[in-house]
Amino acid sequence: MESRKNVEALALARQVEDYIPNDPVLVKLWPEMSRVVEIHSSPEGADVYAKPYEATSADWQLLGRTPLKQVRLPMAFLRWKVQKEAHGTLEVTMEEGKWNDLRNNRPVNLNFVLTKAEDIPAGMVRVPGGSSSLDIAGMDYLKEVALQDYWIGRYEVTNREFKRFLDAGGYTNPQYWKELFVKDGRTLSWQEAMLQFRDKTGRPGPAGWELGDYPEGQADYPVTGVSWYEATAYAQFEGKSLPTVYHWDKAAGTWALDWIGQLSNFSGRGLAAVGTYQGVGPFGTYDMAGNAKEWCSNAGWNRRYIMGGGWDEAVKMFVDYDAQSPFTRGPNYGFRLAKYDSEPAKEALAPIEWTLRDYSKERPVSDSVFGIYRSLYAYDKTPLDAVLESSDESREYWKMEKVTINAAYGNERMSLYLILPKTSRPPYQTVIYFPGSNVINQRSSQNLPVHGSAGLDFIVKGGRAVIWPVFKSTFERGDALNSPFPVANIFYRDHVIEWAKDLGRAIDYAESRSELDHDKLAYYGFSWGAVMASSTTVVESRIKVAVLLSGGFYLQKSLPEVDQINFAPRVKIPTLMINGRYDFIFPPDSSQAPMFRYLGTPGKDKRYVVLESGHVPPTDRVVKETLEWLDHYLGPVK
């Protein structure tokens, strides 16, 4: 149990129970490792199986036939399989409300709804209705929307399926193309629009196809390189719809990022056949996280929403929102279909937009006022009391240590990971890493995500050491804060100050290690971490250079003590910003450019690189720009 292996703990406890059923220690441990639940099905008489979510290749364990009373389950996220003759088989996870009840030791009554096999639309799964709310870029005032029961594709639409549309004359039949074609403010005729949707050889079809056909061996891969218009036309052809963002989000189970994201295709290696990755959602969908990004029906600022992230993006894109021009045909742009038994509510179909900050009309505070704000970030340099918790030398290119130290506040302890390269010699130049916001929703740092499109492996392979502090609110230090987006209240303000102090304590620790070069210290922030740099690199004078990937100014208000606009002009160190031109979270004109403009770094020492991508730029360019920047300002690695 101390290792959080509740499945194994429960199995062992059941053996122990045969010998000491009334032992007071065992009696105390039962409710900590397990929960007692009721399990029903509609209709009853179904066989129920379960296994740990991450144990994809393990055998299913039969729990019995419904109704089941007093079933003891491990306190763990589980996969479920429910079967009854003449009904479709359910393979699902737990719904959010039930999981919260289980986790908080409230009474849990599971009821799995089965549908007769002949009533299930081919390739689709049922999602129960209820209210659905969105948390887009921290805009928590977006209204809840009531949803009726609906169906959604188990998988993304594949090349094989889309080929039927093309072969049936889908690109030559106007009846499937119901939407008005508007590009750059001009309405296109149907004939003009069709010229936009050509494959590599100039034939009608997705952007990556040739001669009207998909690449050999990829029949079961998701169709990609399709615009929103093409996805909508295919939905018309099938008599279905693109899901609204509300329907997509409910089916995806974005709240379960910590589990689903780890078993989904954010590999950086390419698309995979649908269902290859086992990140199943709460209602039986696959690949809603990663693989292909998925068009949804809703508009916003003359764009259309596209959800879930792609194979070449960071795992946080599963929970982040994106919207792009409906004509965009990215190599990872795909879709899945929904089927509604009744027309969705108008609120679900409506455009999703909100008011943004206009930084051209705002001004930073004076130096005297800022001096007061800055004083809030000071802390006493008390002893670290560092403890080496673990050391792993199994990697080819680096050694990783986990260390705990005293935090700068609240008598807390904090962890940090020190990654030492095997490809260079000390003293090592050192990079302090501030990650993206996906770690706010993860509760264990055991498998630190150092790889991928926003990873750190290239820095360590290049010979520099990396320190990854476990910041307040992330991983096992999780608390009531569940979003990185600012709120104009003291709770958020205090967290920003604590994050800055965590960074300072990590640097205090770096200075205690003789193999690290204390005079060559860099900051590398991704997304949330790039945003935080506008304050952390001001209050922490020991940082010499910064690289900010996928960041910008927040478009929400915060208290002035932590507002970026008051800190950015005080940044003086060399700073590189790398961004995507089509970043929906931090748009170029309203977010990226204002941040770069306000940076107080001299013009010759700051650089703004805009690449043809969404929120996460291509890895090869990130590596090149980052290493060249660090080499220039810290010197090449020995």
Image (cartoon, helix red, strand yellow):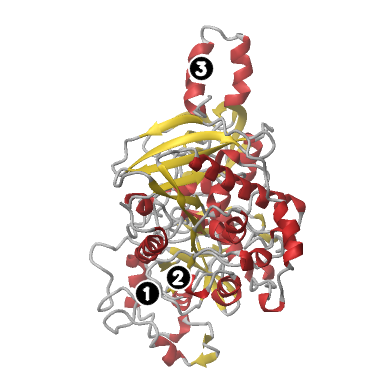
Q: Do the residues labelled 2 and 1 touch (CB within 8 Å)?
A: yes
Residue occupied by mark 3:
14
State the SS at label 2: helix
Q: Is residue 117 left or right of residue 637?
A: right
Where residue 506 appears, as percent x and y from the top left, is 54, 43
Q: In which quarter of the image is residue 137?
A: bottom right
Q: In this view, does 59 lie above or below 486?
A: above
Q: Which of marks 2 and 3 is in front?
A: 3
> Of the numbered discs in the image, which one, if any, rests on residue 357?
none
Residue occupied by mark 1:
165
Task: Mark 3 or mark 1: name the one nearer the start of the chain.
Answer: 3
Q: Which residue is located at x 33 percent, y 71 percent?
A: 163
Amino acid type of the residue tagged 2 in the rendering: Glu
Where residue 469 appears, as percent x and y from the top left, is 52, 44
| Along the viewing direction, whichever of 472 and 87 lies nearer the viewer | 472
Task: Mark 2 or mark 3: name the one nearer the start of the chain.
Answer: 3
Q: How far apart are marks 2 and 1 (CA)?
A: 9 Å
Q: In this view, does 159 lie above or below 18?
A: below
Q: Which residue is located at x 63 percent, y 24 percent?
A: 31
Whether residue 413 is visible, yes or no, is: yes
Where residue 48 appears, as percent x and y from the top left, is 50, 34
